[in-house]
Image (spheres, rainbow, N blue to C red):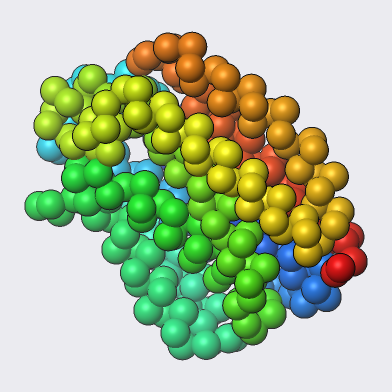
């Protein structure tokens, strides 16, 4: 049986900023617009975290039973390493999705029934990333779904359950968070490019190749910074946050060009994930105390 620590690592805690940052940033916007509702913010955060953990376990299970994790250079996988039975990991994924569904149902009862459909779509997207006969992550669509669900859905959904509306500001923020989340997946797939190629897993990195994937990563960071700058035109204090974030982003843009491969990209992956969380917190703080211009 897997140990508690192995289950914790199997949940891939280093990916959790992708769930935390959009919710935190959206809450900052709600605070700035005097629309923040604490209870709904907590529920939205719970949904996001449960969906992320469920997706990670589902990914571990599906890749493990398909044998596509045998050439991985990333963190330990429960099924592929033999630490846990595939059935147990699948149950863990189901339980995580169930928690997300229950919390989402409560949010829907407090706001609008449409959230039920959105939540169902999010769970299906989490499962079919690597699950099912034709997982979309194996065909190069992972980045698109990450942008939609970790950017648009997570950010605007969090703002909606508090403000009761979707605004242009929340859209800008959602695209900013989405692009940073995509950057995490891009460097993750760049790290696994050789193993995925051998496993016939045609991620976007495999389809594009090494050089274009690195430029795509850089583009995601640059576009995210430009969107943050655009948001600063509306909430002027965000410009101060932008000045703080730019050097961190430029450092990552530089590092991706240093030619690291495989395990050498693990620090860059961790730094990109950390930047997303920092950016989400900084934007939230700036939005929370900003005065609409």
Q: Examine the rendered structure and indicate whether residue 218 appears above or below residue 236.
A: above
**Residue at 27%, 49% in the rendered image:** 141
**Residue at 36%, 30% in the rendered image:** 213
User: What is the quadrant of the C terminus in the image?
Assistant: bottom right
Q: Position of residue 12 (x, y in %)?
A: 45, 36
Q: Examine the rendered structure and indicate whether residue 267 appears above or below residue 42.
A: above
The answer to whether 211 appears left or right of 235 in the picture is left
The answer to whether 110 appears left or right of 209 in the picture is right
Q: Quadrant of residue 72?
A: top left
Q: Position of residue 168 (x, y in %)?
A: 63, 72
Q: Position of residue 44 (x, y in %)?
A: 59, 66
Q: Examine the rendered structure and indicate whether residue 273 appears above or below residue 100.
A: above
Q: Examine the rendered structure and indicate whether residue 282 appears above or below residue 195.
A: below
The answer to whether 202 appears left or right of 154 in the picture is left
- Nearer to us in this view, 277 or 290: 290
Looking at the rendered structure, the number of numbered marks drawn on it comes to: 0
**Is residue 36 something that shows in the picture?**
yes
- Nearer to us in this view, 146 or 108: 146
**Residue at 77%, 77% in the rendered image:** 35
- Nearer to us in this view, 184 or 48: 184
**Residue at 18%, 36% in the rendered image:** 202
**Is residue 21 something that shows in the picture?**
no
User: What is the quadrant of the N terminus in the image?
Assistant: top left
């Amino acid at each position: 049986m897997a140990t508690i620590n192995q289950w914790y690592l199997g949940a891939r805690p280093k990916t959790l900023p992708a769930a935390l940052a959009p919710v935190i940033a959206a809450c900052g916007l709600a605070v700035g617009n005097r629309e923040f509702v604490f209870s709904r913010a907590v529920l939205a955060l719970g949904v996001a975290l449960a969906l992320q953990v469920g997706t990670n376990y589902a990914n571990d299970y599906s890749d493990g039973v398909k044998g596509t994790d045998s050439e991985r250079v990333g963190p330990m996988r429960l099924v592929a390493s033999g630490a846990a039975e595939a059935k147990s990991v699948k149950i863990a994924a189901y339980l995580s999705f169930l928690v997300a569904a229950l919390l989402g149902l409560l949010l829907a009862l407090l706001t609008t029934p449409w959230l039920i459909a959105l939540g169902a779509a999010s769970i299906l997207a989490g499962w079919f990333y690597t699950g099912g006969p034709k997982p979309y992550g194996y065909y190069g669509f992972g980045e698109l779904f990450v942008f939609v669900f970790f950017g648009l859905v997570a950010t605007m959904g969090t703002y909606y359950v508090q403000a009761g509306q979707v605004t242009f500001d929340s859209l800008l923020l959602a695209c900013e968070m989405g692009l940073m989340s995509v950057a995490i997946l891009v460097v993750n797939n760049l790290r696994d490019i050789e193993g995925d190629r051998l496993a016939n897993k045609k991620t976007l990195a495999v389809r594009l190749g090494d050089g274009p994937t690195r430029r795509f990563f850089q583009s995601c960071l640059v576009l995210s910074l430009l969107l943050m700058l655009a948001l600063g035109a509306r909430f002027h204090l965000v410009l101060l946050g932008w000045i703080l974030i730019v050097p961190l982003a430029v450092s990552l843009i530089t590092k991706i060009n240093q030619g690291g491969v495989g395990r050498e990209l693990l620090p860059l992956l961790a730094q990109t994930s950390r930047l997303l969380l920092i950016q989400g917190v900084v934007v939230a703080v700036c939005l929370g105390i900003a005065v609409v211009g």
